[in-house]
Structures are given as C-alpha cells and as structure tokens.
Amino acid sequence: MDFSYTEEERMMLQMTRDFAEKTVKPLAVESDREHKFPRDTVEKMAALGLMGVTVPPEYEGAGMTNICYSIAVEEISRHCASTGIIVSVNNSLACEPVKLFGTEAQKKKYLADMASGRKLGCLGLTEANAGSDAANVSTTAVLDGDEWVINGQKIFITNGNEADYCILIAQTDKSKGHRGLAAFIVDLDNPGFKVGTLEDKLGIRGSSTAELVFEDCHIPKENLLGELGKGFKVALVTLDGGRIGVASQALGIARAAIEDAAAYAKERVQFGKPIANLQAIQWMLADLSTEYDAARLLTHRAAYLKDQQLPYSKEAAMGKLMASELAMKAATKGIQILGGYGYTTDYPMERYFRDAKITEIYEGTSEIMRLVVSANILR
Amino acid sequence: MSIVVFAEQRGGALRKITFEVISEGKRLATAAGDSLKVLLAGDNVSGLAEELKKFGPDEIAVVNSDKLADYTTESYAGVLTDYVKQENPSLVLLGHSAIGKDLAPRVTARLGAGLVSDCIEINYDGGDFSFIHPIYAGKAVATYKVNSAVKIATLRPNIFAMEEAEGAANVVDFAPEIAASRTTVKEVIQQAGDRPELTEADIICSGGRGLGNPEGFDLIEQLADALGAAVGSSRAAVDAGWRDHQAQVGQTGKVVSPNLYIACGISGAIQHLAGMGSSKCIVGINKDPEANILTVADFGIEGDLYKVVPALIEKLKEVNG
Amino acid sequence: MNIVTCIKQTFDTEAKIVIDNGQVSTQGVNLIVNPYDEYAVEESIRLKEKNGGEVVVVSVGGDKTQEALRYCLAMGADRAVLIQDPALEQADNLGCAVAMAKLISQMEYDLVFCGKEAVDDGAAQVPSMLAEKLDLPQANVLTALEIADGQATATREIDGGSEVLEMKLPAVLSAQKGLNEVRYPSLPGIMKAKRKELKVVSLADLELSAEDVAAKTELVAAELPPARKAGRVLSGEIDEMVAELVSLLKDEAKVI
Ligand SMILES: Cc1cc2nc3c(=O)[nH]c(=O)nc-3n(C[C@H](O)[C@H](O)[C@H](O)COP(=O)(O)OP(=O)(O)OC[C@H]3O[C@@H](n4cnc5c(N)ncnc54)[C@H](O)[C@@H]3O)c2cc1C
Ligand SMILES: Cc1cc2nc3c(=O)[nH]c(=O)nc-3n(C[C@H](O)[C@H](O)[C@H](O)COP(=O)(O)OP(=O)(O)OC[C@H]3O[C@@H](n4cnc5c(N)ncnc54)[C@H](O)[C@@H]3O)c2cc1C
C-alpha cells in the first residue's frame, strides 16, 4: 500500500491550495453574506481545467484521477464551501453522467462544453415528493415526434440559477415505477424552462439552490441520456461519484475549522496561558485531527477504487458519512474553542458551522449513507 | 593590507549608504591594522572627495570618465576589478543598494572570490573576518566565513552607524582603461515627491489593507509629512492597486530598517515582518486587539486608524510647534 | 526565441525556521519555486508564446529539485535540466553560477532569465555572476520588459525610482515582482509536464571538476535572531494614547 502522493497529485495540491488562498478566500465572506455566485472565480477555475478534472482530454477535460479531483474540491472548500460545491456539481453531477452514459455526439457537445467550463451544468433529480426517495419523480417526459416534451418542477437544484445545461431525471412511463425513469440533457436556453424560487439558506450561500420549472419544454429526441428505463441507474451511479465530491467538500470545511481553532488556541490567553496549553482543548483538537485523517483516507480510498474502475459505492458512502459528520463536529467544536468570538461573524468559524450542515444532507442524507453501507454489508 | 570601499554616487551626489560603508570600513581597518582606501568613480566627481575625507580614509582613488557618467554594470565592474587587482585588499565593501547588488556579484565572479551579501555586522577576530547576514528574510541569522584572498561584502543600508574619523585622506588619480558597456541607460525615472527613499529613511509610515481604500494613503502621507518620513505599504495594499510596488515592504518587497516604523492597518503577517522586523522602534495601529502587529510592536495602539492617525498628526504638529 | 530560465527551489515563505546543530533544518519544510523565479518563468513563457522558440528551465539541486522543475514545466516551460552532483551540495552562489554558465554555454539561446534574488539567502548574486561567466550584458530587478528585433528595453528598479536600459540580446535578465502576474499551472499543463524532458547532468557531464565549483563562502553557523522584547499596547482614550505615544517616541525611544 502506498500512501504517498504522485507528482501530479502533489502539483494539484500546491496549485489549488495557492489558488484557493489567493483567489477564492478573499471573496468568501462577501459571497456568503450577499448570496453572491462567484462568477469570476468560476471563469478562472474553468481556465485552469478545474471544471472537468476527470474528463478525458478529447472532451476538453484534464484527464486526471479522482484523487486529484478530491484534492481540488477539498482545497477550494477549505476557503469557500460554496465555490467547492459549484465545482463538485459541475464535475460529478453534470459531466460525469454524460461521460459515463452519453453518446459520442453528446460528449463532443455537452461534455466538452461543461468540462471546459464554457457552460455550467446541474443535476435535476430532487422534487417536492422525491427527496431521499429519489425514484418517486413525477416530472414527465413524453415523446412527441422528434422531441421530448417535459413538464414538472425540480427543487433544491445547485447551480440551477446559473446553469446552461441540466441533467434531468424524468418519468417516461409512470406504470413502471423507477424502471420508468430516464435521464435527459436539457439545454436550459429554452422557452419551456424557467427558474422558479431561489432558496434562502443557512449555509453555502454563495451557490444558488433553485427551483427549475419545465412547462411544455421541448428538447430534441437525441437528448435522451442513456437508455429509456435506466434513468434511476444514471442517478444512483452519478450520486455515488458525487459523494466523493461532497466528502471532499466536507473535508475542506473540517480542515478549515481545525486549522483555525488550533491557531486561535495558540494565541488566546486565559488564566495566564494560551488555551492550547489546556488538555481539554488539546484533546478536542487531537480527536478532530484523527477523525479528519480517517475521513480523508476513506474518501481517497473511494476515489482510488473509482480510478481503478472497481466497485466503490459503499466506500464513497462511508467517506461521505464520516467526512460530513466530522465537518459538523469540527465546526461545532471549533466554535467551542473560540468561545464567544466563534459565535460572531468576526471569525469565519460560524460560516464553517453553517456550511458544514448541508454536507450531511445533499447527495444522500447521513441516514441514506448508513442505508447504503448496511445494505452492502448485510447483503 | 588594505580595505577597499566602493563609494556610490548617482548623478554626482554621494549616497548615504556610502558614508555608512566607509564608517564600517574604517572601524574594520582600525581593528585589523589595515589601511582604508576608497574608490570614487564617475564623471567629474573629484569634488566629492572632500565629503569622503571626513570619514577617515587613508586614500581616495578618483576615476573620472564620461563613460562613467551613468552607472552601467560593465564599465563600473571593470574599474572596480582593476582597482582591486591593483590594491590586492583583504576586504572589499559596497552598499547593498541597487548599484551594490548589481555590481558586487559581477566583480566577485570576475575575481573568482567569495561574496557575502546584505551584511548587518562584520567582525574581525584578530585573524579573519566573519560576516553576519540574515537569511530566510530575517527568520535566521547566519555567520559566514570567506576563504578567498579578497573577500567581498555588501552592507545593508541604515544599519551601520555613520562616524566621522581622522585619516590621511590622500586623493590620487586612478586611470584604468574603461570598458564599453553593452547596456545603455535611456532614461532615469525619479519617484515623484521629495520623500526620502524607503531603504534610507529614518522614519517610515506604512499603510495596509486596513486603510480600506486608496484614498486612505492621503492620511498616511499627512502623517509622513508631519514626521519627514517615507511612505511604505503592505503587499495587500499594493496588490489592491492602492500603491506602487516600489512602496512594498516585506519579503517580496523592500527590506527596511528605519529608526521608527509606523504600521497603520497592517496585520503584521510574517512576510511583512520579514521586511521591517529589524526596525529600531515599531509602532502598530490596528483596530483588532489580536492583530499580530500589536504583539510585535514596541508601542501598540488598538483603535481605528481613522481616529488615531489624525489625532497623532495633530499631536505631532503641536509638539513640533 | 530560445530562453534559458534559471530557478531555485526554496523554502515556502511561511516555513518556520528550525536550527539544528548550527544549520537550518530542512526537515518537513514545504519547498516551492523561489517566488521571483516564478516571475522569470512566467515572462519567459510569455515571450515564447509571442515569438515562438522554447523555454528551458535549469536548476542546481538534489532529487527534490525535480519537483520544482516539473512545476515550471506544468506552467508551460518546454524542458528542464537539473545539475546534480555531490560536489555541488556545499557550493555557494558562485559555484552554482559557474555550473549553470557552463551548461548554458553549450546551449543555443537568446536570453537567460533569473529571479532577482532567492528568498532563502536573499543574496541576489547568481544573475550577475551568470552574466559575467557568460560574458553577457545584464539587467537586474526588472519591472517591465520589451523585446523587439533582438534588442531588449528593460525597466529596472533602482533606489528611489527606476531606469530604462537598452541592450542587444543575448543578455542575462532578472525579474522583480510587478514584471507580470504569474499563472497557475493548469490541469492539462500538469498532465503534459509528466511527459516533458527532464534531464539530470553531473559536473563530469559538463566537463567541470569539483575544484571549479568549490565554495569561497561558507555558512559556519546559523541561529535564530534574538527575540524582540515584548512591546506595550497603550490604553486609554485616543487623545491620551496619542500623547503617551508621542512622549514615548521622543523621550524613551528617542526616534523623533
Ligand atoms: C442546498 C441544497 C442543495 C441541493 N442540491 C441538489 C441538486 O443539485 N440536485 C438535486 O437533485 N437535489 C439537490 N438537493 C436535494 C437533496 O439531495 C435532498 O434535500 C436530500 O436528498 C434529502 O431529501 P429531502 O430534503 O426531501 O429530505 P427527506 O427525504 O424528506 O428526509 C427527511 C429526513 O428523513 C430521513 N429519511 C428519509 N428517508 C429515510 C429512510 N429511508 N431511512 C432513514 N431516514 C430517512 C432523512 O435522512 C432526513 O433526516 C439539494 C438540497 C439542498 C438543501
Ligand atoms: C510568497 C509571499 C510573499 C509575500 N510578501 C509580502 C511582502 O513582501 N510584504 C507584505 O506586506 N506582505 C507579503 N505577503 C502577504 C502577507 O502574507 C499578508 O497577506 C499581507 O502582508 C497582509 O497585508 P495587510 O496587513 O495590509 O492586510 P491584512 O492582513 O488584511 O490586515 C489588515 C489589518 O488592518 C486592520 N484594520 C482594518 N481596518 C482598520 C481600521 N479602520 N483601523 C485600524 N486597523 C484596521 C485589521 O484589523 C487587519 O489587522 C506575502 C505573501 C506570500 C505568500
């Protein structure tokens, strides 16, 4: 077993760490406070190849490993979890399904557009009645001559307000239940589409979470992604990969909380000495650091398995479960270590706290992660 | 044996660093029992010898040539190398200034000698010189020895005390053949204003991101006016486009060591400290009680610079009448 | 236009310095491309992108230095040469310059680019030493550069201002911050870097002996600087603090 970085992973780490520190960090506070989508940063990330990390070069991606991808999302999320999820969604939820299930023509157009960052993607799965029960989709797609006609609403869609393309999961045959689902690529520049409600959120406020409304939205027949009846599989496989992204985002938040708390503890003097000298504080930091390493190893293992094209669904769920719960714990303890200062907006700790929570919810809640793991081990 | 000092002048005026280097040269020459020789090169610079005499050299060698009107590396390197070859000194000293930094390594390579740059102290222990030079932007201090017959060093500005001294002060002509320079100076752009040069200033007032906007530097200028100070900047303020890069103090900017450094709205990042940590007295004005600058400063004021600085300017005016 | 760009691998500027046995410990320190050298690499790549030709990055160092060279390749340099030799481990700046000059003299080039100084020893020696050894004109600490018809027009920072120099190429130039904005290596750049040539040569390959690069300067001991004595944070109303400060500066510190 080899736990060392390859040269390319090391460069990825150095570059993204530098980039995040200099470019992402300065905008994080404003992005959060004002619900501001970091458009310029996305353009810069696109120029660097960060919008299609694992997409092969023939489709204008960087052709790198999932471990590199995980490193990039963690480093970006270290300074801004909103920017982290924008990257993660475009890579994992939009590029990946086209890469895995798309036709050559779809890849040449849609995948290349999204991997290069010329266009931004999103995944439209969740609906009012289809959350954890993702198969319960009621948006419909009906074939009408050479076109599919889509009707329905998606909710909570990350990048929904800015995206150019949506990977949409819809029903083509209600009678077949989840076997009646199919995936589509929808160009959102379409008169049958509009953005509905934008959510006002606790955290990741720099990324948009939108309602997508489809009313007689006509798309070409050839925009069916994968086979009819296989839409649920597209969704599940996509989410498996997405969990590596969300786990990495959670790792970034956790590391931010741990690093900031440690730095503060060394400076803050009470009872005549830095609070870092108190065992109560030391043990919190020791536990968090240990769990951080464990979560990171789990996440990188999932990424490694995916790179080797081995099954990784359970491992990705484990990584996400552990990393997201750690992020929440690290931010909670982080505020504890900062005391009252941690509760104010003078320090970013309260933002880490607000940002951390979503990682336990989207792309499968912690409960669903436990379901995935237990289903795998009790099989 | 002798110690040779290169007297730096630009546009016919001696630079302050020259007096500092000669003063240190004199101290070392006295300690080592060597004579102190100064090389003064330029076009029509004989008149400057008078000023040099005050610092006690035994000899001042003057080279005048229209080819030396502008500082160019190659012409000056030739002159200094020839002089060193003629005198065969134990030690050659220059300032760690724009000219010294450019010239010393070229001459060193030509002589195949050893060079220690940016010294803050040179000691003579009875047999040999040792050279103290900060490394890692002042995070460590290293002692160097040089094993070549001629040892060369450049001295950090504003560190070595200027000291007048007695000396024979013979003025002699030196007339080497002067090499043509392959570079030509097309233009010299002096920075606007009559503020002292950052690296030479006794007092520096610096502003950082805490100013909030470029206009904030107006206030720093006023403070500098009240003190006759130079104006510096943190990198954050330079990167924001509020101030020219020439004003940046720090690891990737200028290294300064004034008597007084006043940091306004600067957090005191390690890279900034690298540039001003050797200042004799540091004042920090910052509204964040946790800001590192307040820990580092000799005197810290926790408060809004927009309230503190105007009050300080008023007080200074009052005190200075 | 063929450009040789010299780089040094240095400690991260954030690195905490630990002294072990009178020498700076390299244990666990994050290593980077010297920041000023990055400006030189960036400028070289821009010149190549405009005028064609190739950028060769050159360094003196050990095994780890390959990482720094790869980073430059990922930024867009075309190939790299590392001069590695036990005899260079104790070399001073002149020794390194001698070795690099020998290598460069065997190449075809129009320009040699360096950073104005390395952030570790802050000596600013190598560019001028290279120029001397290659018998070329030099222009250091550049904040602007134009190249046309084999002629360089370079703006060099001097004390209290700047000067504009002209010279025919080839020449040795050194970069100051402000010359350009350094790019990040892109992901495709990182991938391509793996396949670019990185050659390691020894002194023998360059027909140099250990004698030719023997150090003339030796770092005999390093120590941490004396800690500044703890300062005072003044308290009270603004007027009181300002009055106290002025009297402290006047009477205690005697600096105004
Ligand atoms: C900010 C944000 C961004 C999002 N981005 C996207 C996006 O880009 N694309 C997209 O399609 N969706 C997105 N979502 C939707 C997200 O994936 C869902 O919110 C999530 O899957 C949970 O669904 P739900 O909200 O309906 O909760 P519910 O499914 O109603 O769950 C409520 C609670 O019940 C628990 N629960 C439910 N079923 C079980 C079970 N079987 N066993 C045990 N516990 C159970 C859950 O764990 C949870 O605690 C986003 C959501 C948010 C808030
Ligand atoms: C390779 C490298 C090289 C670097 N080189 C340098 C260098 O040469 N020089 C340099 O300076 N930096 C350098 N840096 C950058 C350095 O790390 C810091 O980012 C920079 O010094 C911060 O500048 P600042 O103190 O102005 O800004 P900040 O760190 O943002 O600090 C602003 C301060 O202003 C205070 N403030 C805000 N408003 C007010 C007010 N109204 N009144 C009073 N105080 C207020 C705040 O409390 C804060 O402490 C370098 C970094 C790297 C990575």
Image (cartoon, coloured by chain):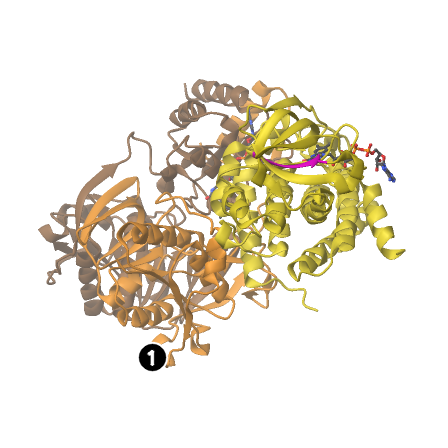
Residue furthest right in the image: A378
Segment colored magenta: A165-172
Chain for disc number 1:
C
Q: Give the residue pinned by disc 1.
A: C208
Q: Residue furthest front?
A: A145
Residue A267 picture quarter: top right
Confirm whether the magenta stretch covers residue A168.
yes
Q: How many marks?
A: 1
Q: Colour of chain C?
A: orange
Point out residue A219 in the picture as x, y percentages from the top left corner: 57, 32
- Residue at image position (55%, 27%) is A190
Q: Is residue C123 magenta?
A: no
Q: CB at mark 1 closer than 8 A to ligand 2? A: no
Residue A113 visible in the shown view: yes
Residue A33 horizontal side relative to residue B13, left or right: right
For badge 1, the amino acid type reads Leu
Which chain did the renderer colour brown?
A: B
> What element does badge 1 sit on?
loop
Q: Nearer the viewer, residue A353 or B289?
A: A353
Dominant SS type (magenta): strand
Check the image and report above or below for C209 versus A22.
Answer: below
- Of C63 and C255, nearer the camera is C63
| Other-residue count near label 1 (Cα within 10 Å), few / some / many at <14 / 14–19 / ≥20 | some
Chain A appears what colour? Answer: yellow
Quarter of the rendered image showing ligand 1: top right
